[in-house]
Image (cartoon, helix red, strand yellow):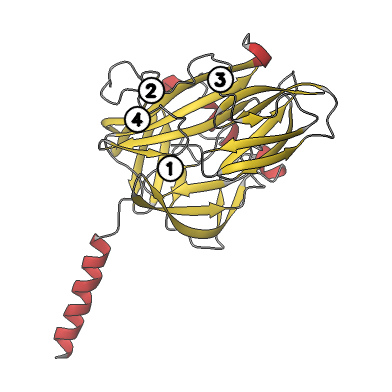
Amino acid sequence: MKRIFIFYCVLISHYSYSQITQPFPDSSASWVITEWSSGGGAPGGFQIYTYRYFCNGDTSINGVSYKKLKESFNLDPSDTISSTVVGYYRIDGQKVFYLQDSSYAYSVISMYNYFYFHTNQEILLYDFGIQIGDTFSLSDSTYFDIQGRATLVLTQIDTIQLSGESVRRFNFTAENLGCMFIPNYFWYENIGSTYGFFPNFYCFKNGITFNCFHENSINYVFNLQPGDDCMHITLGENSPSKNNPTSIFPNPSNGIFTILSDFYDDYVMVTDMTGKCITSQSLSVGNNLVNLQYLSAGIYFLKSKRGVEKILIF
């Protein structure tokens, strides 16, 4: 009887372990990103473009198997040709490791390795086995250690609904982020983070919006505007804004604005004409009051997940 009981427990344990979901996608997945940067010839000094990362195929490096990570400005998941190899990743239990492609050394995403890591070896992107109260280092860089931006603390694990699917969300402290433009920071099991595929992003002049995640014909929507989908984002290349007069009102105003948000985990950032960040604030779904009366009269730019809009304070 004792042996039967032990066998039963082992069987249950094995069955339960086999039901643990893959912590990260390993095929047919796309992360659709909108990136903006201050500087350049766009009005207000903003340039905005949308692209996607996607995994496509396998490779072996030094005897280790990896998934290929590619980048494309064609958002159609069926297009796997017009793309560039960014790097490689592998899944080991609940951990995800990343190795950047050496030929991609002078691209924008190369800054992820250049600024956050001083190594040409693979780096730990995620550990979905982390427990509440544990810390996770986003960088081995001395600069970010000095600035206090390297280590985050996991404060909560909850479950949210995305496109009718239950997704585990890991809530971290946000004040140590290297990017001040996103006040809330999350990991999403089997998806990625607030930033999409990568858990951090160099954003001295850049900001990033994770629009949606596409896998197996399902769009997991994070920040899409009405009428958009994962294969068609209206806020396109070098477009300074998406004209949506109802997203902020009144405009002009004396510094008191109401901002309408349709998105969870939303935020707003206010910059001056040079692109310098003045303030940022978390937003809730619905109407949000933003008080900018302490600013001098003039033209400013407001960046939210709807896009970038010019505001006037009189």
Which amino acid type is marked by label 1? Gly
Mark 2 closeness class: few <14, some 14–19, many ≥20 residues within 10 Å: some
Q: Are marks 1 and 4 in contact (CB under 8 Å)?
A: no
Where does the image place residue 96, in percent across and percent down from the top left?
40, 45
**Residue at disc 2, secondary structure:** loop
The amino acid marked with disc number 2 is His
Distance from disc 1 to disc 3, alpha carbons, whole Å, reads 30 Å
Residue matched to label 1: 192
Q: Quadrant of residue 284?
A: top right
Residue that sits furthest to the top in the current view: 41
Q: In 3D space, how far apart are the residues under numbered discs 4 and 3 (Cα atoms)?
A: 29 Å
The answer to which of marks 1 and 4 sits earlier in the sequence is: 4
In depth, the one of 243 and 280 nearer the eye is 243
Is disc 3 in contact with disc 2, using a CB cutoff of under 8 Å?
Answer: no
Q: Quadrant of the N terminus?
A: bottom left
Q: Given this view, does label 3 or label 2 mark the residue nearer the observer?
A: 3
Distance between the alpha carbons at the discs numbered 2 and 4? 16 Å
Q: Secondary structure at mark 1?
A: strand
Q: Amino acid at mark 4?
A: Phe
- Residue at 67% over, 33% down: 269
Q: Which residue is mark 2?
A: 232
Q: Residue furthest bottom?
A: 1
